[in-house]
């Protein structure tokens, strides 16, 4: 199992990626990693940690892709960047199974979509983040931004790919799939949603439970939400932003009075645990589904623990044979 | 100032509407109301409250439109329902200025769009709810579900109509308008968003502050969000659902330990105030903008206070000459 790790472009690069890889190596005995980035910086961390391992390979590609780079320009002009180099190696070297990057999302999605082959039958790769619901579980969102315009057939494929992903990564049996819509009734929404509803109802290999209103996103009633990339992006960011704003507001409330401060003191541990619970970094990266190799996009602010989670996440998908299962499921519906 | 009130179809009809109207009459001295619904039920409440007023007229139309009715069927077949009757009176009687209903949203929007004339220049009426942000203010959302498919020109009109509304209803000077998008940079999103961005930048009479990510919805940095009806619906419902789920989760936390329960006791008033703060019923109904007459859709679960707010909201829009201002603003951009 060989994973290539992009060691530039994150807020805490390269320490987060190098140290995250070391943690992941300890966790996954069959794992080997290729660290791509500024070789001096990477080696310095390895030496500091006194690491010498045959399971680690370092590749020098010191240029950085940033969020300001236009995807097409970055692909064409930044060939020596860690990200574009990693994508090329992933494509050309059959022994490499997966890529983990904390770098610029837009460039990664574009480069992976253009350069890495798709699983047989896949119309478009899809971006699928995992969000904690409010009952200790999680919910996946397919798509969250890779495809702003979609067709009913694409939504059907998202449901299939997302289901295989939730099974492989989170061990959820028969994930409950909801179609994001403006109401729960079958005939709600536009032609796209109505047509997708009819397709999903008759799709083998998924457990379609009907339309889902955004109000129910974190209710624990759904394991996977299927939607176009625009509204999926709105859904994920709105939930994240609202949860954080509510907690911030309560904090201001608590600080406004002595009595509340005392109450807050008693609940200090509870609030700390809640903050940790809602910290998306604990839930792994955002996966690009549908490409022949596994691609995990960690959050830009990932630290070493978050990067460890992203790398182990890739291992779990590989171990579960996820892509092979996606291929089989797609054959069934084609 | 004459407002017609639909006294059927809400969860608390007709008490919520009749008693809400009585409260609104006290608050707005120039107001007269027409109560449409089951005459016996309405008169019973008026008698119980010992109300005899020339400012109140009662119209008998006992049939109820429900959420299960298809809009087209309801319009065609339920002519004696309070809602369809109210819409007809609003259209035919020039002395009636506005309609308030807690009934079925889909039918109301469809009937109003079909039967009530549009303000000169308006392409499509738009549904605009008001949501409390987390800093004591509010934010409007244009559109939240009336138009699932939109054009850049429609989004431009939404910005203009929504701005005049936030000024008239909430007294906000130069409301800050954000375009809902997947990122803040100018070139983000699909052609629709990019084209709308260019239009909004050069629209007189509005204060466009750029793209808004859903994460910032409740940050207090925006007074009005412009978007297609599908993603606007997702935005509003996701924010509402997430805020409620977070509070519910904290409640479960608090009940899980003696120590937290004690803390919760100290903060009882604070949590009660927060619950009230996040109660959308306190913020008035959802307005349909762009029709020649003012139309306010109260929440189905409205009580008499919420209905009073919705009726007074209509009065404020009438007093502010909102529709005349919308007409003038649209002329400027045509």
Image (cartoon, coloured by chain):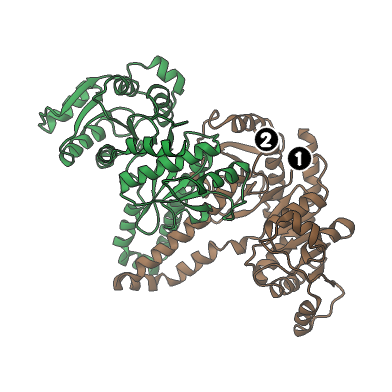
Chain colours: A brown, B green
Alpha-carbon span between mark 1 and mark 2: 10 Å
Task: Give the class, few, some or many, for how many residues have Cα within 10 Å of label 2's Cα (few <14, many ≥20).
Answer: some
As rendered, which of B201 and A24 lies closer to the eye? B201
User: Measured along the vertical axis of the image, is residue B43 above or below residue B289?
Assistant: above
Residue at (70% x, 34% y) in the render = A153
Whether residue B258 is visible? no
Horizontally, is A168 left or right of A281 in the view?
Answer: right
As rendered, which of B50 and A28 lies closer to the eye? B50
Q: Which mark is residue A123?
A: 1
As rendered, which of A52 and A176 lies closer to the eye? A52
Residue at (47% x, 55% y) in the render = A242
Displayed quadrant of residue B273? bottom left
As rendered, which of A104 and A207 lies closer to the eye? A104
Residue A130: percent from the left, percent from the top?
62, 54
Residue B88: percent from the left, percent from the top?
32, 20
Residue at (37% x, 59% y) in the render = B135
Q: Which residue is mark 2?
A: A151
Reading the chain from its start, which is encountered first: label 1 or label 2? 1
Displayed quadrant of residue B65? top left
At numbered mark 1, what does the secondary structure look like: helix, strand or loop? Answer: loop
Marks 1/2 in contact by CB < 8 Å: the verdict is yes
């Amino acid at each position: 199992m060989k994973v290539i790790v992009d060691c530039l472009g994150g807020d805490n690069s390269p320490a987060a990626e190098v140290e995250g890889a070391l943690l992941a190596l300890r966790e996954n005995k069959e794992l080997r990693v290729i660290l791509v980035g500024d070789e001096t910086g990477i080696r310095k961390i390895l030496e500091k940690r006194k690491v010498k391992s045959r399971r680690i390979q370092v590749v020098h590609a010191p240029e950085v892709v940033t969020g300001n780079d236009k995807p097409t320009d970055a692909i064409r002009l930044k060939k020596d960047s860690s990200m574009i180099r990693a994508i090329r190696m992933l494509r050309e070297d059959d022994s490499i199974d997966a890529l983990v990057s904390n770098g610029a999302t837009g460039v990664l999605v574009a480069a992976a979509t253009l350069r890495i082959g798709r699983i047989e039958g896949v119309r478009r790769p899809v971006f699928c983040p995992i969000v904690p619901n409010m009952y200790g579980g999680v919910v996946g969102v397919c798509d969250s931004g890779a495809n702003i315009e979609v067709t009913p057939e694409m939504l059907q494929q998202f449901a299939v790919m997302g289901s295989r992903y939730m099974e492989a990564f989170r061990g959820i049996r028969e994930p409950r799939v909801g179609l994001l819509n403006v109401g729960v009734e079958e005939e709600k929404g536009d032609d796209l949603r109505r047509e997708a509803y009819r397709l999903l109802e008759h799709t083998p290999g998924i457990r379609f439970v009907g339309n889902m209103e955004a109000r129910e996103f974190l209710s624990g009633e759904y394991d996977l939400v299927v939607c176009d990339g625009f509204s999926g992006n709105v859904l994920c960011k709105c939930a994240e932003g609202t949860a954080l704003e509510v907690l911030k507001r309560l904090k201001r409330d608590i600080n406004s009075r002595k009595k509340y401060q005392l109450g807050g003191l008693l609940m200090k541990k509870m609030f700390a645990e809640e903050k940790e619970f809602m910290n998306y970094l604990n839930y792994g990266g955002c996966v690009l589904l549908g490409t022949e190799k596994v691609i995990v996009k960690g959050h830009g602010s990932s630290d070493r623990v978050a990067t460890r989670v992203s790398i182990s996440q890739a291992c779990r998908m590989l171990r579960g044979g996820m892509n092979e299962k996606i291929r089989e499921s797609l054959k069934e519906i084609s």
